[in-house]
Image: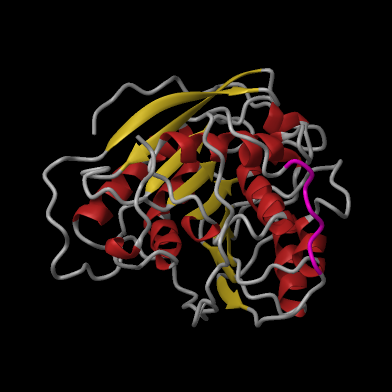
Amino acid sequence: MPRLRPLFLTAILFAPGCAPLRDMPTPAAPAETIAAASVSTPPIPTLTGRQATPLSPTSVPAASPIPALVGETVIASPSPFPTSLPTPDPSPTPCVEPGRIEFGEVNSAVAGEPMRYRIYLPPCYGSDGRVYPALYMLGGNIHDDAIWDVLGLDEAAESGITTGQVPPLLIVMPDNGWLANTTTSGPSSYEGFVLNELIPHIEATYCAWPAAEGRAVGGLSRGGYWSLMMAFRQPDVFLSVGAHSPALIDSYAGPAEDPAITGVTNDLGDLRIWIDIAERDPYIVQARPLHDVLESAGVPHEWHVNEGTHDEAYWRANLYSYLSWYSDGWRIDRDQLPECATP
């Protein structure tokens, strides 16, 4: 779908404690895909102000319980990720209106300025009067709201939806801004912006499913760290969390923020977890210990190490795998979804 894209940032801006890629060790790692078993863990601490009133008058309905996921833990093949989606539904719902990207802003009290976002709306958006699951996809510390659009995530979703391989969904692509690079956690951080401002704004403005069952969060690089940090601290907010080449290097993160700690001390319930990284990615030095501790504690998750390095080519090559995994949590009939209350 043709549209104008903003210029990609050429300056690399690292958050406090984030060393440039060239300064990170680069160990070799064999391709592998591993998953772990379940475990019961103590309750998660509550984030103050998590359910703050959104910018519009509409409040966010309370998230309903996340259903148990049968067969969530999968031992996958060590071969590279597939480059196509699963076999399509033999009778996908016909739709002549294509999907589209819209641009918006959140007047953020946390950031003290408007925060931009892009949102992908699926074909025939709103025509059946039902809500849609929403996938929040975060970029890295040098990215703005354009990165997942530039990688082609919306085109991949469009292809999958029109052939019945991906359920109709919304994809929200926010700008990280300075918040994501200079804050750690809590209501005054990027976490607070996403949970208390962005999500309520999207659910008050679009036909987004306003419950945990209808939300997933993921990100690449620094965004992968944020997605894990938020979801492990607040697992009742999301159905699924994905970390794609996560850069787990926040020097200011303490026990309350470190996914290697919160992932085993907080009760994650039925949260679906995916972590992937390339075998030549410098950040595998931090990602592998996270997998190891989750595996040792029996926390269900998918762990994938594949060919490649920390770059756009790697993420672009794996878009269909990401979409397929997120979609697995939402393979339900649309007529079973709630009606959309958004005008």
Above/below status of 290 relative to 182: below
Residue 155 appears in view: yes
Horizontal side, residue 48 vs residue 276: left or right: right
At a point 37% along the width and 23% down the height, the residue shown is 5
At a point 56% along the width and 62% down the height, the residue shown is 64
Quadrant where the C terminus is found in the figure: top left
Quadrant where the N terminus is found in the figure: top left
Instruction: Find residue 139 and report its image quarter.
Output: top right
The residue nearer to you, when weighing 252 against 172, is 172
The residue nearer to you, when weighing 97 against 131, is 131
Instruction: Find residue 37 and report its image quarter.
Output: bottom right
The residue nearer to you, when weighing 231 against 289, is 231
Describe the colour scheme in one phrase. Answer: secondary structure
Is residue 47 part of the magenta span, yes or no?
A: yes
Residue 283 appears in view: no
Above/below status of 23 relative to 12: below
At a point 88% along the width and 49% down the height, the residue shown is 254
Horizontal side, residue 135 vs residue 236: left or right: left
In the current view of this chain or complex, which residue is farthest to the top? 113
Locate residue 302, reporting x and y percent.
57, 70
By secondary structure, the bulk of the magenta-drawn segment is best described as loop
Q: Which residues are magenta?
A: 43-49
Is residue 145 part of the magenta span, yes or no?
A: no
Locate residue 339, reporting x and y percent.
34, 52
Locate residue 29, reporting x and y percent.
64, 66
Locate residue 183, reporting x and y percent.
77, 33
How many numbered dots are placed on residues in this image?
0
Horizontal side, residue 9 vs residue 265: left or right: left
